[in-house]
Amino acid sequence: MFMTRVQLKRLPTPNVIHSVLSAAFPGKRSENANENLWRVDNLGDTKVLIIVSTDVPDLKQLVISVGKSKVGEFSVNEPNKLDKTVDYEPFLKSIANNQNWNFRLCANPVEHKRQTPTDKRGKVFALRSISEQLHWVRSQGDKNGFSIIGCSVTGDSWIAFDRIRIRSITFDGLLTVKDPDAFRRALTQGIGRGKAYGCGLLTIAKAE
């Protein structure tokens, strides 16, 4: 697994990112390239594109397409601090039970409501209240090998992609690892729905 970060010159739409990811993973079919986890994040005053992928992307292609660095200034061997791809595996292997981590998750919290008695799965609705959203993310922890110590909603937006509109909620908080293997799967496979549209990527940082 690999993690890539690219400093953005502007905020790209999900359509643009789909196209960019397809070009950055030339050995993959288009639909498979867009199975990679990604999100646009804020790093201080800078917007960055974060990608978690099974293959190494063409970093130069990413920078040329959406990056802030000028093409003539970019070098794969000497990229700036924000434009880089790193091997994610050593970090993943270091995860152990009962570790505490600061986390960020942009996700699509939803519920299924049955419309008729014979409706097995129900229609999907975005969770609207903060209390419902926080309950949802705590329940995801139970499924993905962690428990939440504290959490708050720090972002709420709608993502439009063709005729699709999904609600993206940003959660920031502190968690404890309870099942390292399940937690690693959450970090590499994502959480919840809408992964093709920039939702589901869980990232962590060392807790103070």
Image: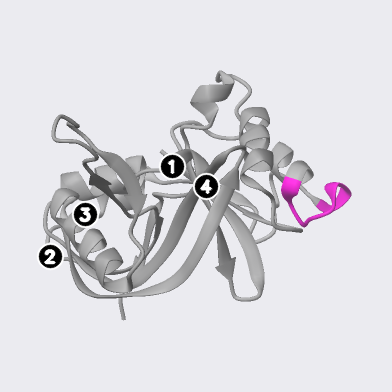
Q: Residue at x 23, y 55 (%)?
A: 95
Disc with the residue nearer the chain's start (3 vs 2): 2
Q: Residue at x 63, y 23 (%)?
A: 26
Residue type of the residue flagged with mark 2 = Asn
- In which quarter of the view is residue 124 placed? top left
In this rendering, is residue 119 above or below 14?
A: above
Residue underneath mark 1:
195
Q: Secondary structure at mark 2?
A: loop
Query: Can you see residue 59?
Result: no
Q: In front of the other: label 2 or label 4?
A: 4
**Relative to the observer, which residue lies in front, 113 or 109?**
113
Disc with the residue nearer the chain's start (1 vs 2): 2
In this rendering, is residue 99 above or below 11?
A: below
Q: Residue at x 41, y 51 (%)?
A: 201
Residue type of the residue flagged with mark 4 = Arg
Quadrant location of the C terminus in the rendered image: bottom left
Residue underneath mark 4:
165
Residue underneath mark 3:
140
Q: Residue at x 34, y 50 (%)?
A: 125
Q: Are marks 3 and 4 in contact (CB under 8 Å)?
A: no
**Relative to the observer, which residue lies in front, 47 or 140?**
140
Region of the chain picked out in magenta, as a range: 66-73
Residue type of the residue flagged with mark 3 = Gln
- CA distance for labels 1 and 3: 15 Å
Does the magenta run of residues contain 71? yes
Q: Secondary structure at mark 4?
A: strand
Disc with the residue nearer the chain's start (1 vs 3): 3
Mark 2 crowd level (few <14, some 14–19, many ≥20, 10 Å Cα)? some
- CA distance for labels 1 and 2: 27 Å
Q: In front of the other: label 1 or label 4?
A: 4
